[in-house]
Image (cartoon, rainbow, N blue to C red):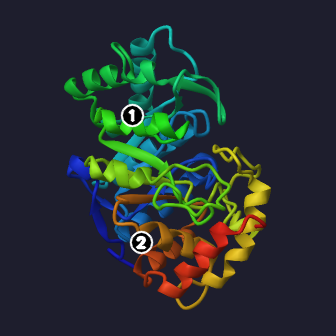
Amino acid sequence: MEDIVIYRTLGKTGLMVSEVGFGCGNVGGLMVRGSFEAQVRAVEKAIHSGINYFDTAPSYGDGLSESNLGKVLTEIKPKVFVATKIHLRGALNDISGNVRRSLESSLKRLDRDYVDVFQLHDGITERGGGGLSGETIGIYDVLGKGGVADVFDDLRSEGLVRFTGFTGNGDTETLHSVVKSRRFEVIQTFYNLLNPSAGMEMPDGFRGHNFRQIIDRAAGHGMGVVVIRVMAAGAIGGPIARQGYASPTIGSSMVTDSGYFSDEERALKLDFLLGGDLSTRPKAAVRFALMHTGVSTTLVGFSGEDQIQEAAVAVDANPFSTELMVQLHEFWNDTSV
């Protein structure tokens, strides 16, 4: 299996990234809990299939994901793009110092001189404080003088990061304001079969967190769009997909009006999408996300090599038919599911 994955431009960065990115987080778990041998095999298989975008963060395994990814990439020396993040967690007394120390630690663990994309991991709300999944950062601390965006600009001018981004978690109006500021080149955004509001107008009956087509807004400003939570934290695949090195516990849904077990129950009603090459819900989830032309890459958290093959099949599958899209809209409009 070689070069199955297709490439798209990561917005105005100009980077040509694979449609499927390698998520190195806790849910898939391979780069956190896997053996070095298993990690090498999986990364080699991903690269042979054309995957060239790897996403990690200090919070994934308390630094293990970055360390393990760094060791694997040092071993096989591929030409890939690496993205990582900073999670301030309310530590706003010294934004510049905290961001710099976090990046320095990340670069050391990754064994790299720079990262291609450096992103804010915190949720963003108007005033900060308690938020959708704990502590959030206020928009002034992101865009104001001496805030995150200013520090990111300094790091870029010093050659420590090539491009900057943020995670589209928080209140919708504030997230749109950050996009409009044009201070970042990349956004990570929630987009999946259970909550597609980041990429399309939702019917009146939709009861989830509404991101109000932020993909279109971001792409319109030339931003690269990285889809996260394409499996809704594993709920779309369900217990069958939680194998190998997948997280043994269920994490936060990270968005309001959503919970893992209710999402898992709703996902069971998506089996009408299955058929042909799309024989599983995870395959259908990846295919759906890539149907949006504003999406640059979709991160998939792999727990085993077989899931890399599944993702490659999904990339090559036909888009959903008009009939299936009509059924999906009925699903989203049905408040009973």
Residue drawn at x 71%, y 63% as measured from the top left: 242
- Secondary structure at badge 1 equals helix
Distance from the alpha carbon under mark 2 to that under mark 1: 25 Å
Residue 137, x across and y down, in percent:
53, 24
Residue drawn at x 47%, y 33% as measured from the top left: 174
Q: Is residue 318 above or below residue 137?
A: below
Q: Would residue 305 appear left or right of 108 to someone viewing this image?
A: right
Residue 237, x across and y down, in percent:
67, 68
Please identify the quadrant where the N terminus is shown: bottom left
Q: Is residue 195 above or below residue 144?
A: below
Which residue corresponds to mark 2? 291
Q: Quadrant of residue 255?
A: top right
Residue drawn at x 20%, y 51% as measured from the top left: 14
Q: Which amino acid lies under the numbered mark 2 shown in the image of this protein?
A: Met
Residue 58, x across and y down, in percent:
52, 33
Which residue corresponds to mark 1? 178
Q: Which amino acid lies under the numbered mark 1 shown in the image of this protein?
A: Val
- Looking at the picture, tell me which residue is in the foreground, 309 or 137: 137
- Secondary structure at badge 2 equals loop
